[in-house]
Amino acid sequence: MALPSRTRRWLSGGALATAALLICPAADAQPAPSRSAYAPHVTVELIADRDHARPGTQWLGLRFALEPGWHIYWQNPGDSGGPPEVQWQLPTGMMTSPIEWPLPQRIDVGGLVNYGYQNTVVLPVRLAVAADVPTSPVVLRATLRWIMCRDICVSGAASIALTWPLDDRDRGGVASWSQAIVRARALVPQPAPPAWQAAAVAGKDTFTLDLVTGQRERAISFFPLEANQVDDSAPQVLISLDRGVRLGLRKSAQLVKDPSALRGVVSFPDGRAFEITAPVSR
Amino acid sequence: MRHATIWAVALPLIFVAGPFIARAANVGGPAPAFTGTDTKGKTHTLAGLRGKWVVLEWHNNGCPYVRKHYGSGNMQALQREWTGKGVVWLTVISSAPGMQGYVTAADADAYAAQSKAVPTAILLDPKGEIGRLYDARTTPHVYVVNPQGVLIYNGAIDDKPSTNPADVATATNYVSAVLSEAMAGKPVTTPTTRPYGCSVKYARLPQD
């Protein structure tokens, strides 16, 4: 999905953000805007790892608490659906980075496969705060849009906001929020160790992906970062190698031309997950 | 001598047919031959549509992505425009009984009437046979077949994979692009894209 079209989508979604602004007047004149929002089958919440703004890097979290059976999607949703999106309105001197995505689950929906999250998930967001933070209260606002499915799909939207410094009521929660964000960040795949080697060979219908980790690997899952390359619902055929593993990945029915590289996340049963880039040759 | 000739003819056919067995809905290959029954009880086959341009549109009236296109009037406008130019537009409903989007014939017709949808016909596929044949993954998921029975498009309805109706106006519609190009005898610029939408609600397998 190209960035420009996403930007255009947010421009058209700007009406929603504007409406939220009109409904939520200035922080100093009214009670703090709500950090959480309730929507059918989900509660969304904006959390942070500190109770006040501080120069440097801080972490925010978008917490989705889903009813059992429902799921939201990873950055590559798989066969259907789409990832949650957030648009920020931040005080001057603050800037967010894109969502950092914890390792998803493979969710099988009647033979189609999605990549996503069930129950509770915190999506960490890095926040950069400039040196001269204001001392008066500041409001960080997130306008969220998501698609959420069980056997049916529903789309949702919410505007949530956090005021720094936190008031007494919220300050008490920061320790647990901070832990939740630390846990979520630990689930975000790391870049592959420099010593690893990844390479893929493209056949007519499959990619053969070889990953050299330095030790024999017996179980691994591959989550493609790009759509239209790998068939998400096909089984991944694994062969253990002395110093790594070989995966047979069926090509996507939508693949027109072999890509120059396969980018994805590999995960191991012990929970380690890494981002790899495997150049593709014929 | 005659046997050799038969083999010389048969072998290339076997060779060519091979790749199409693996993935049925390959663009550039023959569109999978289907038989379907519409909401009026009439049977439609792909073979019977030879000589026509055909659009297959997978549908689930509860899916937010489908509602984006029907609520905005976009799908109805496409149906009107292209059936007006002689295209056979088939809406296919592959939701299994009990799953979202499953409708009786009467309800399917009622929804169409109420939303002013004008497909040529609505095929009811509750066993998911046509859906699996085409590997239909999402609603919407669209396919275009040319008058020679070749599949010339398989993928998304447009280039904005969102549920936001406001995106319809600024999206590039692939169905229109493909039909415009192909009907003018030009090569199709984008023959395949990744379809977006809700997953097609096939019957759950026993272990689900």
Image: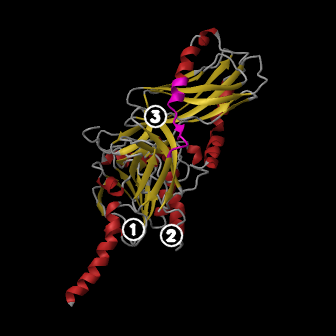
What residue did someone put label 2 on?
B182
The answer as to whether the residues below labels 2 and 3 share one chain is no
Chain for numbered disc 1: B
Cα separation between marks 1 and 2: 15 Å
Tell me the magenta residue range: A182-196
Q: Is residue B171 left or right of residue A256?
A: right
Residues B160 and B27: in front is B27
Is A214 above or below relative to B130? above
Marked residue nearer the N-terminal end (1 or 2): 1
Q: Are marks 1 and 3 in contact (CB under 8 Å)?
A: no
Residues A92 and A15: in front is A92
Q: Amino acid at mark 3?
A: Arg
Cα separation between marks 2 and 3: 49 Å
Return the mark for residue A272: 3
Q: Would residue A227 be visible to someone looking at this image?
A: no
Query: Residue at horizontal 36%, vertical 57%?
Result: B134
Query: Residue at horizontal 37%, vertical 37%?
Result: A151
Disc 1 residue crowd, few under 14, some 14–19, many 20+, Cα 10 Å: some
Point out residue A202 in the picture as x, y percentages from the top left corner. Answer: 44, 59
Return the mark for residue A276: none
What residue did someone put label 1 on?
B29
Secondary structure found at label 3? loop
Q: Is residue A127 left or right of residue B173?
A: right
Q: Is residue A77 magenta?
A: no
Where residue A134 sits, quadrant-wise, is top right
Q: Amino acid at mark 1?
A: Gly
